[in-house]
Amino acid sequence: MNCRICDSSDLDLAIDLNDQPWCNHFLRIEEIGTEPVYPLRVVYCQKCHTPQLDYTVPKEVMFGDHTYLSGVTRTLDEHFKHVANEVDRTFFKSLTKKRVLDIGSNDGTQLKHYQQLGYDVLGIESSKGTAEIANQAGVLTLHDFVSGELLMQLPEKFQVINASGVFFHLEDLHAITDGIRLVLDENGVFVVQFLYMKRIVENLAFDQIYHEHLLYYNLETIETLLNMHGLSMFDAYLSPIHGGSIVGFVGPIGRNEPSLRLQGLRKEEVVQQSNAYSTYNTFAEQITLLKASNREFFERAKDVEKNVYGFGAPVKGNTLLNYFEIGPEYLDCLVEKNELRRDLYSPGQYIPIVMEAELAAPPDIYYVLAWNFKEEILTNNQDLIAQGVEFYFPINPRPVLL
């Protein structure tokens, strides 16, 4: 393959997480053992420094219908509310007519907050059931795969275009980036929100590597892409959401000078060699050590006959469980709130999912797969902690200093 951004063929293997099933392919009982597996490898482009997967599971497989809902988690909802308020207050407070487009809008959680601020909203969502949920909630949503062609067919331009957790999913990345530039109002802002690879490395959060995430951006690498299409990031900050994500503000090249906080983040990447191949080699070594320590944890729990449940059944948790080779011999079940995952099983390890509200009793230990919502989880479960239930975090996110 060639680099997804710069088309270079100078790619080297950085991280190999073995063959794995698509991690959002939660299984009905009759499907167990039938799910396909695919290589899960990150390669590094020696020219533009972008880490990326070298194998693409077709978007029709991954995004045609899935069980992820943005609105399930209070922390994420509050984050989206903050972003909408910040964008409106900073750029568009005085406008009486304003429109926002959300690419990969899921159940409309982000767009609801723009609606409350007086925006006309439009979402594009590839998952049929998820798009139906958004439309039923009054959030106008197109059920389609985003493409450059689709964007160019939209009849009006937008003051705000949002892409939250989707810009690293895209196969036809260049056509879509062109389309964004064309439908963005001349004074508009493209708000791009993405997992920050620098923080993934710092947190050892390798579970955020999975087949849906084709690319892993730092500022240097996403700015290379944007600049190729006449766009430039002029401001950004590091948000604590998902263990550390960038919220970036983008406009046409030359319209805005880069902010001081963006310049500071760029400098940190240079000083800490965040885009160096050697950094990813070290990361791969640390992932191997993390696997060993987590398997030791489960063996100790088994030796003293402690029962362990998984807390949450997030998509990324399946990368971790499959790479660590943790199945029902160690985890009795995965405890979820999302009704779309009721009575399903995790792909690869086949751990049953049960609804949190239907548990007869808590376990001795919760193994927290939804570690990126650590503060919310600990706050909401003080009564269980007081009863002696242990919450074990396989990934322990470092705090983001705002």
Image: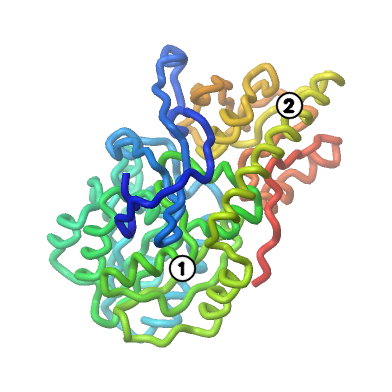
Q: Can residue 361 be seen from the camera position used here?
A: yes
Q: Position of residue 14 (x, y in %)?
A: 52, 46
Q: Position of residue 141 (x, y in %)?
A: 27, 52
Q: Is residue 360 above or below residue 104?
A: above
Label 2 crowd (10 A; few <14 / some 14-19 / many >=20) = many
Secondary structure under tag 2 reads: strand
Label 1 crowd (10 A; few <14 / some 14-19 / many >=20) = some
Q: Is residue 350 left or right of residue 384?
A: left
Q: Amino acid at mark 1?
A: Glu
Which residue is found at the position 63% from the left and 67% from the top? 272
Q: CA distance from mark 1 to mark 2?
A: 41 Å
Q: Can residue 112 be seen from the camera position used here?
A: no
Q: In front: 115, or 170?
A: 170
From this viewpoint, which residue is outermost toward the front?
10
Numbered label attached to residue 171: none
Q: In front: 75, or 196?
A: 196
Secondary structure under tag 1 reads: helix
Which mark is first along the chain, 2 or 1?
1
Disc 1 + disc 2, Cβ < 8 Å: no
Q: Position of residue 267 (x, y in %)?
A: 57, 76
Which residue is found at the position 73% from the left and 26% from the top? 308
* Residue at mark 2: 308
* Residue at mark 1: 220
Report the quarter where the N terminus lies. top left
Quarter of the rendering containing residue 233? bottom left
Q: Amino acid at mark 2?
A: Val
